[in-house]
Image (cartoon, coloured by chain):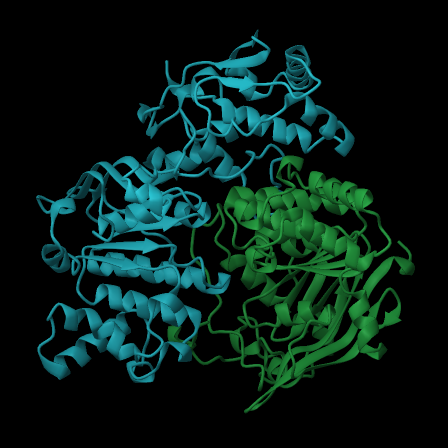
Chain colours: A green, B cyan
Amino acid sequence: MSASDVVVSAEGLRIWYGTERGPVRAVDGVSFELRAGETLGLVGESGCGKSTLGRGLLDLLPEGSKMDGSLRYQGHDVLAMSTSRRHALRGSDLAMIFQEPLTRLNPLMRIREHFEEALRTHEPGVGKDELRRRSMEVLRRIGIPPTRYESYPHEFSGGMRQRLMIALALALRPAFIVADEPTTALDVLVEAQILEMLHDLRSEIDTALLLITHNLGIVAEACDRVAVMYAGEIVEIGDARDVFRNPRHPYTRELLRSTISLSTTGLHYIPGAPPDLVEPPSGCHFHPRCPDAMTVCTTTAPPVVESAGTLAACWLQSPGAIPAGAEEPLRRREISDADEA
Amino acid sequence: MPTRPETAAPTETLIEVEELEVHFRLQGSSLARLFGRDTGHVRAVDGVSLELHQGEVVGLVGESGSGKTTLGRALLGLEQPTGGRIRYGGKDITRLGERDLRSLRTELQMVFQDPNAALNPAMTIARQVGHPLRIHGLAKGRDDLRAKVSQSLERVGLAPVERFLDKYPSDLSGGQKQRAVIARAIITGPRLLVADEPISMLDMSVRSKILQLMLDLKNDLGLTYVYITHDLASAKFFCDRVAIMYLGRIVEIGRTEEIFRDPKHPYTKALLAAIPDPDPDRALPRDLPRGEIPDAADPPSGCAFHPRCPRAFEACGWEPRDLQTLLDSHWASVSVEDYEREREVVGDLSGLERARGRAVLRPGAGSTAADVRALLDRLRAADPEEPFWRGVESVDVEGGDVIVTFAPAEDPVLRTVSAVRVACHLYEA
């Protein structure tokens, strides 16, 4: 793959918003690249900055938040663009899929009208027959029968509505989509159907997809690569199968171990909770909860190390660089249930 | 690493549910109500029999709309059954009045899915955890109340209690709130706890802790659990027995290890196969059941799962609306031009949804019954393995219409198949 395939690239991206107690550093120096046709899973506990990052990438941050660092979209510097140019990107080039589709569909508009409006707004020259043909083509691809074309949103089931949302997002063939927990509100079988559909679409359309989820099973199922976020930072990023087979960062490993799956025979959990992002812990943010923490982890942020294409920010990955005497295991204070997430 | 302790063989029956029905009347139009016309019913729970033994964990597993929550609420007298019995302590609790139910509720308690909704945001933790004691008059004065609340909070791990007593729900994390909800549920010393998706709103890293807490409480307090969930993975770990529910009925029930080792019902098999697993070597199957759980106000005839079932055959209850589904899924796979041409051939389809028995297709203007029949023949030839055709007895032309006749429907009933009970025609000799 050539560098021109890169759709989104972020470097040292930071997003923060002000509170009475000081700025909340929700995203704190995140770097990654996403290529055409690629799906990147973004995982981590609640409050680690996943959704903020997703919204930031689409310029959908609420008022009062600030973003700096570098964000390039097909080579263009997004942060240097005028507001109107950034807005013009949305819809035609960038799109978002939300968790609860019913709140994003207009209850008074027929499905036909939703599609015609979206297409007409971004491609004003298209004729009526062409609009109809193209909308029905998109619906067909996601398995909505053409007989439902004139129906209203409430006449569809939850799974159908999420299909409609995805179809609306894809109608304009955007180059980059952020999907924030797109299947969380759905039943197991419907979730599996939607994942199958996303998988098929991904191979048909060359869209780059950022899939935000708390479900590691979905990442293993639907993503090429995975980024693990903790306290506003990406602590590990790499090929999803490689990371799940051989996690480098203790946080990734502990998240995987605490997931209840069909092969679970004993319960495991990460003590404590993600930190307050106004005053995150010094050094490695994960050190107060990390079973492998050393004294160096409390003072100095670990360097990012690459091995076999996977990047991880953990001192265990660069033992040679630890100052002498600082590799002592950290004696941790006991974390009680009362401090949990 | 704590593991699930082996439970002793259950002995005493705690609750016995017999042929329970909870049907909700639909509102309908005001005119229909005025004339007392039947506006239809949602059959949320439709003939469920189940025994709960002292000290066991029984899982009610199913998708939304399966009736699992309604069944759980009916066990506590929170829903008024329209039929059947629930025996507890020698009494049929479906016949008790509000006053008798109220005293029963100290013994039968519930933990809800969303701790944010279950806790009152304007009440301190101490006040709401102690609420059941005040309602039932179980505390002797302020000090006794405070002591019992503290004891309950300690039991669920919210210690030191001074840190939590005077806090409001908004000061607590998701896991802590769910602990407070559990503290409130156990404070009256119940025998049965119905837990409705107690971990599904929580972060992955906290779910295990709450499950562990529930296991500890069960062992310490001798509780019996009904665990309502859509998550088979946690049910597999947590439950002694599971009942798989679909559209108000139990389709399969048995010991957890049996159900997971060798699932019998095609619905159970599909659910199990559809769980996304973090293991990169496991992938989702490509032959997922189609569609979604249907409307419980108008369930499919025969086996309610038949329209989605990959193994359905003659007896499963095929009916006219299945023809509509077949045409829809065909049209979702052809070009817009082909759809529009074929759509004109079959004419008005609006009758199929409500029709019972046989399906009548009246050709559209400019088409003949032979055209309609040719279209159906083409569909069948294109996908002869489609289960729908197994249920079609004949396709005839009658007075310009095409008539599709289906094999008679039979309701599958639960029967013992090796170590489990399953309701599926596939297992009838």
A23 and A131: which one is in front?
A: A131
A212 and B35: which one is in front?
A: B35
Q: Residue at x 66, y 10 (%)?
A: B370
**What is the quadrant of residue A4 in the picture?**
bottom right
Measured as percent of width and height from the top left, residue A110 is found at: 63, 49
B392 relative to A48, above or below: above
Relative to B150, B197 lies left or right: right
Measured as percent of width and height from the top left, residue B152 is found at: 24, 71
B48 and B256: which one is in front?
A: B48
Q: Confirm whether residue B88 shows in the render.
A: no
Q: Confirm whether residue B193 shows in the render.
A: yes
**What is the quadrant of residue A70 in the picture?**
bottom right
How many numbered badges does the structure rendering display?
Answer: 0
A116 relative to B242, above or below: below
Q: Residue at x 33, y 73 (%)?
A: B120
Q: Residue at x 58, y 43 (%)?
A: A192
B232 relative to A227, above or below: above
Measured as percent of width and height from the top left, residue B45 is found at: 31, 40
Relative to A97, A269 lies left or right: left
Measured as percent of width and height from the top left, residue A187 is found at: 50, 47
